Image: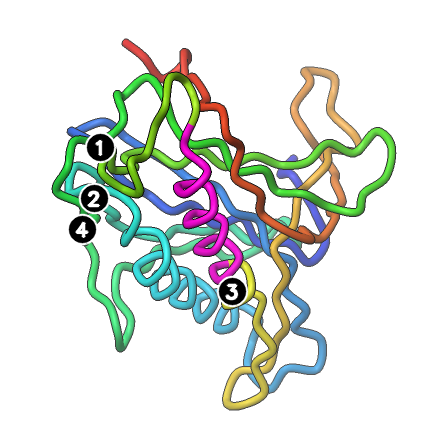
Amino acid sequence: MPFIVPGVVRYTINQRKEGRVVANVLDYFLETTGSVEDRPGSVSDMAGVLINEWSDEILTQVTTDLVAESVSWVDLDSASGSTGLRTTTSQETWPQTGIGTNDPYPSNVAVLVKKNTAGGRGRRAGRLYLAGVSEGTNDATSSNNITAATQTALNTRFAAFLGNTNQTVTAALEYTSAMSVVHVLTRDADGRPLTGDHNVVTNLAVDRTLATQRRRLR
């Protein structure tokens, strides 16, 4: 049985850093009830929004070592939810690299970004790991921490990304979107998730301490 989370679409920003796969997973609740466009059309439109905003806000903070290749998705709303992949919009064409030319952080570390919610007790915040941040960005690191200037700059970018991807679209496509964190409610006998729900992300907060990515090391 497929994993079902009513109203939620799981997007993956597919990238590569020095030839290795980097995937940032972002869940969005899409309200399409009453839309004149079918839900798959709205889901695809939202993928284009992510391409535009990742290019504008996030690729400006990473080096040329990180290459954004595509945004793919699976609609968790139902067992027959749409899947797909986009690489272009009217504004952007991927693959597209970051713009920083200084050395990036080492491959075994990344910037940790917390997806905070008002989910209450027992509901963990989500996480996002940003690879390839330039060492030259605001004198990026001091010991195992990013500097206050780097943290402030990245928080500004992620606040803009969150605000610009939480959409209310009322033209040809009609939908609202909200970045969310998904929680598993039930699993099958083998431990695979069956059903889930979501909490809306209230803010994205960059952590000062660099995060290790041991499972992604060779």
Type of the residue with mark 1: Lys
Nearer the observer, disc 2 or disc 4? Answer: 4
**Badge 2 element:** strand
Q: Are marks 4 and 3 in contact (CB under 8 Å)?
A: no
The answer to whether residue 148 is left or right of residue 185 is: left
Which residue matches tag 1?
A: 17
Task: Check the image and report above or below for 18 versus 181.
Answer: above
Label 2 sits on residue: 67
| Quarter where residue 91 is shown | bottom left
Disc 2 and disc 4 in contact, CB within 8 angstroms: no
Disc 1 and disc 4: Cα gap in Å? 13 Å
Is residue 153 within the magenta segment?
yes
Cβ atoms at labels 2 and 3 below 8 Å apart: no
Question: Dot 1: what SS?
Answer: strand
Label 3, on which residue? 165
Q: CA distance from mark 2 to mark 1?
A: 6 Å
The Cα–Cα distance between marks 1 and 3, rounded to whole angstroms, is 24 Å
Kindly state the secondary structure of the residue where label 3 is placed: helix
The residue carrying pointer 2 sits among few (fewer than 14), some (14 to 19) or many (20 or more) residues within 10 Å by Cα, namely many
Whole-number angstrom distance, CA of label 4 to CA of label 3 = 22 Å
* Image vertical order of residue 105 relative to residue 155, above or below: above
Q: Which residue is mark 4?
A: 99
The residue under label 4 is which amino acid type? Ile
Question: Which color scheme did the rendering employ for the protein?
Answer: rainbow
Residue 143, percent from left and from top = 37, 17
